[in-house]
Image (cartoon, rainbow, N blue to C red):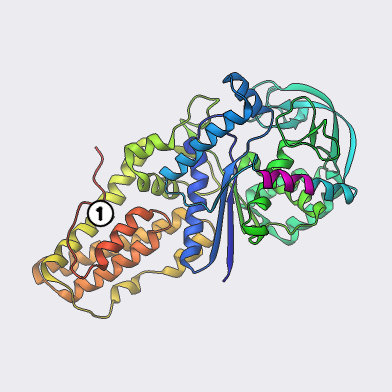
């Protein structure tokens, strides 16, 4: 069987999950389900990034030990993804013992390769990003992402020879443009790498919440060296699914994944992932959704209000993957009522009611010839989820027009109703990666020997 391995970024459990985190997980789940439908052996990894200064400080503010703090919050992330029907294969935590062991082994491999040395580091550090910045990176003297002052940190450190890998990385981007998608993100990374790379500080002594650095136990491993290797730790039994086909992550993490990650892997002697797929930010009233900005929206709250499939559909249909998108409950209402309730729901209701009354008679399904499955496959292959759904719903429109044109409520034509039944089953199949619960209900209803109208699938929301 062909293997397919998809990962998401792992989230800091320094606060509860919000809809910005959820976007990525839903997209990964859509890819996972799509490839399962194609008969592939799929592995889907998500989890939490539990070490580092940010997590330690958040635990202290909550009056808890870091371990107790992350144990409680990692459960919240699992509950959020369960509410969205995100069907992952492993939820990895960077505090997992097999992960800590692998990180220490990798550092030894890089050291044996001559890529680690001891020194001293001083720089401007953002705890929110768990990263150092140069003066030119700042906006009005503050972190470009968190809009707050940085602190000057000076400490002894072990360094990774990142500068050694500049030509290797530029060659990788040139020979494998699919390594960074979309191309706008690739162009940004290429431009920055061409400016030159400095060696990277990969150990810390100013706090102690992390994996012990195997070359010197007075140090802990820098959180980004630790976190990135979760994808290798979690790649199935004995790493059977490595290399990853797709890493999905936000654009604030693109530098770490497109520069540090391939260099770390090359140094330690591992194969590289195939594609780093960078999504834009979801914004709320024009600002990035985040707990620190006080505008986070809980996925569970949204699911309670609209239902799981409504949220999944909106996230996939409303945003162009790779670009920023503004979250709007008004647009969510509109899309749910117009597309799911009116178009799809109405088709399901009318046709099942007509079949209950008249039955069906097997015939050639000419209606299905108006559906271009290849186009949908290509859109998903190029991560254009909104276009794939647009194409599926264009066929829903075609089916609704077919009902209007053929008037089976007047004719009772069983062959027309058979064509519509088979077309609806195909629609349910294509929509399963996006709205699995509703698709399974549609499939069940239209696969029965005796088809009945049943309950309204998408009740209009006032």
> Where is residue 360, by image quadrant?
bottom left
User: x%, y% of residue 379?
Assistant: 49, 61
* Main secondary-structure element of the magenta-colored stretch: helix
> Where is residue 116, by image quadrant?
top right
Q: Is residue 423 above or below residue 203?
A: below
Q: Is residue 112 magenta?
A: no
Total number of numbered discs in the rendering:
1
Left or right: residue 53 versus residue 460 is right
Q: Nearer the viewer, residue 282 or 266?
A: 266
Q: Is residue 102 magenta?
A: yes
User: x%, y% of residue 95?
Assistant: 65, 39
Q: Nearer the viewer, residue 407 or 279?
A: 279
Left or right: residue 455 versus residue 101 is left
Work out whether residue 216 can be spotted: yes
Q: Is residue 92 above or below residue 240?
A: above
Quadrant including the N terminus? bottom right
Quadrant including the C terminus? top left
Look at the image and give the residue range highlighted in magenta: 97-105
Left or right: residue 45 versus residue 205 is left
User: x%, y% of residue 244?
Assistant: 64, 57
User: Which residue is at a point 56% across and 43% down the rendered structure image?
Assistant: 280
Q: Nearer the viewer, residue 72 or 264?
A: 72
User: Which residue is at a point 48% across and 68% down the rendered structure image?
Assistant: 38
User: x%, y% of residue 322?
Assistant: 56, 47
Q: Residue furthest left?
A: 410
Q: Residues within 10 Å of mark 1 (few under 14, many from 20)?
A: some
> Where is residue 408, by image quadrant?
bottom left
Judged from the image, the secondary structure of the residue bearing numbered disc 1 is helix
Work out whether residue 178 can be spotted: no
Identify residue for label 1: 345
Left or right: residue 372 versus residue 246 is left
């Amino acid at each position: 069987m062909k293997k397919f391995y998809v990962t998401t970024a792992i989230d800091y459990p320094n606060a509860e999950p919000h809809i910005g985190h959820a976007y990525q997980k839903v997209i990964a789940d859509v890819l996972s389900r799509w490839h399962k439908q194609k008969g592939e052996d799929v592995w889907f990894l998500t989890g939490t990034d539990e070490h580092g200064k940010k997590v330690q400080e958040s635990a202290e503010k909550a009056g808890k030990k870091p371990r107790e703090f992350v144990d409680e919050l990692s459960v919240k992330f699992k509950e959020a993804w369960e509410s969205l029907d995100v069907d992952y294969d492993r939820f990895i935590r960077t505090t997992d013992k097999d992960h800590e062991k692998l990180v220490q082994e990798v550092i030894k491999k890089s050291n044996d390769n001559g890529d680690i040395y001891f020194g001293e580091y001083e720089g401007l550090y953002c705890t929110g990003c768990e990263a150092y910045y140069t003066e030119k990176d700042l906006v009005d003297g503050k972190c470009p992402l968190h809009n707050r002052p940085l602190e000057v940190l000076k400490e002894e450190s072990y360094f990774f020879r990142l500068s050694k890998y500049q030509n290797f990385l530029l060659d990788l981007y040139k020979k494998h443009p699919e390594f960074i998608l979309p191309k706008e993100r690739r162009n940004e990374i290429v431009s920055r790498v061409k400016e030159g790379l400095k060696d990277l500080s990969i150990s810390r002594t100013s706090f102690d919440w992390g994996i012990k650095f195997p070359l010197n136990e007075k140090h802990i491993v820098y959180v980004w060296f630790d976190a990135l290797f979760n994808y290798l730790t979690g790649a199935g039994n004995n790493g059977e699914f490595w290399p990853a086909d797709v890493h999905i992550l936000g654009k604030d993490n693109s530098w770490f994944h497109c520069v540090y990650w391939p260099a770390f892997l090359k140094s330690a002697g591992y194969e590289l992932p195939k594609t780093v797929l960078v999504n834009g930010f979801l914004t709320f009233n024009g600002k990035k959704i985040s707990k620190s900005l006080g505008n986070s929206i809980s996925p569970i709250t949204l699911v309670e209000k609209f239902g799981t499939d409504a949220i999944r559909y909106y996230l996939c249909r409303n945003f162009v993957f790779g670009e920023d998108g503004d979250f709007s409950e008004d647009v969510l209402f509109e899309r749910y009522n117009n597309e799911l309730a009116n178009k799809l729901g109405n088709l399901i209701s009318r046709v099942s009611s007509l079949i209950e009354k008249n039955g069906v008679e097997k015939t050639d399904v000419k209606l299905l010839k108006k559906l271009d499955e290849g186009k949908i496959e290509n859109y998903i292959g190029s991560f254009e989820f909104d276009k794939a759904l647009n194409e599926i719903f264009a066929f829903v429109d075609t089916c609704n027009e077919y009902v209007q044109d053929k008037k089976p409520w007047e004719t009772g034509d069983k062959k027309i109703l058979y064509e519509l039944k088979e077309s609806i089953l195909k629609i349910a199949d294509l929509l399963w990666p996006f709205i699995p619960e509703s698709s399974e209900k549609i499939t069940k209803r239209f696969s029965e020997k005796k088809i009945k109208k049943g309950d309204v699938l998408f009740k209009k929301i006032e």
